[in-house]
Image (spheres, rainbow, N blue to C red):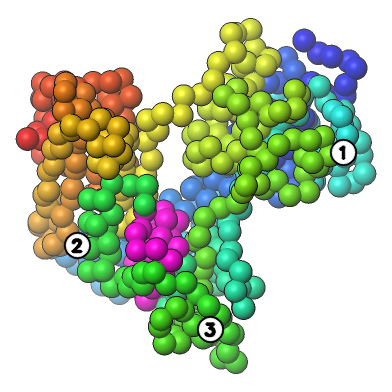
Amino acid sequence: MADREYDYDLFTIGIGSGGTRASRVAAAHGARVAAAEEHRVGGTCVIRGCVPKKMLVYGAQFAEDLEDATKFGWTIEGKSFDWVQLRDHVMADVDRINSVYTETLEKHDVEIFHERAEITGDHEITLASGKVVTAKYILVASGARPHVPEFPGHEHVITSNEAFHLDEVPGCILILGGGYIANEFAGIFNEFGCKVVIANRSDTILRHYDFSLRDRLMQISMTKGIEFLFNSEIESLEKREDGSFGVKMTGIEERSFDLVMAATGRVPNTENLGLDTVGVEVGDRGEVLVDEFSKTNVEYIYAVGDVTDRVQLTPVAIREGQAFADSLFGDVEPYAVDHSCIPSAVFSHPPIASVGLNEREAKEQYGQIKTYTSDFRPMKNVVAGRNERSLIKMICDGANEKILGIHMIGPDAPEIMQAAAVAVKAGMNKADFDATTAIHPTVAEELVLLR
């Protein structure tokens, strides 16, 4: 397998989830592999995304749990919250996982360069230190970064990257955007006692999710004190002497905030990688264009993960990295990743989970559909006196009741949906769910009791 004409069989640019998996598997197949990372090994998900975000979600949930505990007979005196303690615990675990990723690659004899890498010629990579190496194949796995809109004062805005490192919880925060990152951090900051305002340039939050879930989350969020401003874009931001920010938005009087956060999408990291040097084609947003096997228009250059802007989810990047390494270096028939019917979650308060088509998509694709819903108050909320209702929605083909999509908002929705997604991916019908005995009493049993 090893081609001595080159320094390496594979050189990976970016060691996030996709780059790590691809590099490790390629090396396990016997390839000589090197990888470069200018930040920390682990990428967005591990260092500044899903993992630390979920830890903050857990921490935020205790605000409600401690409140609800009194209805379950617990007396909790002198409760208080220490943001710095939580922040430092989370960052310590991020350090641990960063080390695990690094050790995993080193154990597989992947050579790691902790510096920026750029394609500077045919099969050629130049590192920031000036070192020049060659590789038979190059994998671009440089991920994506938060997008910050351009407006006067935009340099004062933070993104999700900085949110994990704040010195204190702000008294009030303006979050720009209506996607999953905006709604997740809105829930986190709100539970920590911060006044949260979400400003969205459209009139829809979470536009890729079913409208029933969107409406329910917004209703619950407003009940919890989160404010929504729709069809509103920021025009200017001014930092005042006291450290606060004066913000002018379309059609709204100037308002004051302690912090402004942009959660307005993510942009593929393709600048200054040297892609144009060898003629790699990119799309309108800078995303690397690839075929189903993650190959670019340049025969020896491939790309996986968020930098391709296919589906910006960690498990997808990992699957793409695995498929790439197996197909190129393994003793298997080349195979592609199936990007259909991918389950996803929003770790809002409460969380959302979804798999398959939403109701609008199902109507467009199938015409005649059947929907089944369960709108209920979970037992824990009933006892706690929390007037917060969960919703489960199943969408089926009207012709044969094949399940096209399942959507849920409520406690543990992501945990429940992972198992349900297997059934939807397998093409099961509603009758298969109906024939399954419920586990009682659970929230999940509503899935097999839908009428």
Which residue is drawn at the image coordinates 58% and 64% (left, top)? 148
Which residue is drawn at the image coordinates 33% and 24% (left, top)? 425
Q: Quadrant of residue 132?
A: top right
Which mark lies nearer to you, 3 or 2?
3
Placement of 243 over or under 77, stated as above or below: below
Q: Is residue 409 left or right of residue 248?
A: left
Residue range highlighted in magenta: 177-206
**Of the image marks 1 and 3, the number of the one nearer the N terminus:** 1
Q: Is residue 185 left or right of residue 283?
A: left
Pinpoint residue 451: horizontal percent, then vertical percent. Answer: 7, 35
- Kind of residue sitting beneath label 1: Thr
Instruction: Judge the density around disc 2: few (<14), some (14-19), many (≥20) Cα neighbours within 10 Å.
Output: some
Look at the numbered disc 2 and give the secondary structure of its residue.
helix
Taking depth in this image into account, of 348 and 256 the one nearest to the observer is: 256
Q: What residue would you read off at disc 3? A: 245
Whole-number angstrom distance, CA of label 2 to CA of label 1: 59 Å
Placement of 65 over or under 7, stated as above or below: below
- Kind of residue sitting beneath label 2: Asp
Pinpoint residue 106: horizontal percent, then vertical percent. Answer: 72, 30
Whole-number angstrom distance, CA of label 3 to CA of label 2: 35 Å
Which mark lies nearer to you, 1 or 3?
1
Instruction: Judge the density around disc 1: few (<14), some (14-19), many (≥20) Cα neighbours within 10 Å.
Output: some
Q: What residue would you read off at disc 2? A: 68
Instruction: Looking at this view, name the residue that lies furthest to the bottom.
Output: 241
Instruction: Judge the density around disc 3: few (<14), some (14-19), many (≥20) Cα neighbours within 10 Å.
Output: many
Placement of 407 over or under 320, stated as above or below: below
Q: Is residue 402 left or right of residue 184?
A: left
**Given contact means CB atoms under 8 Å apart, are the residues at marks 2 and 1 in contact?**
no
Residue 124 in sight in this render:
yes
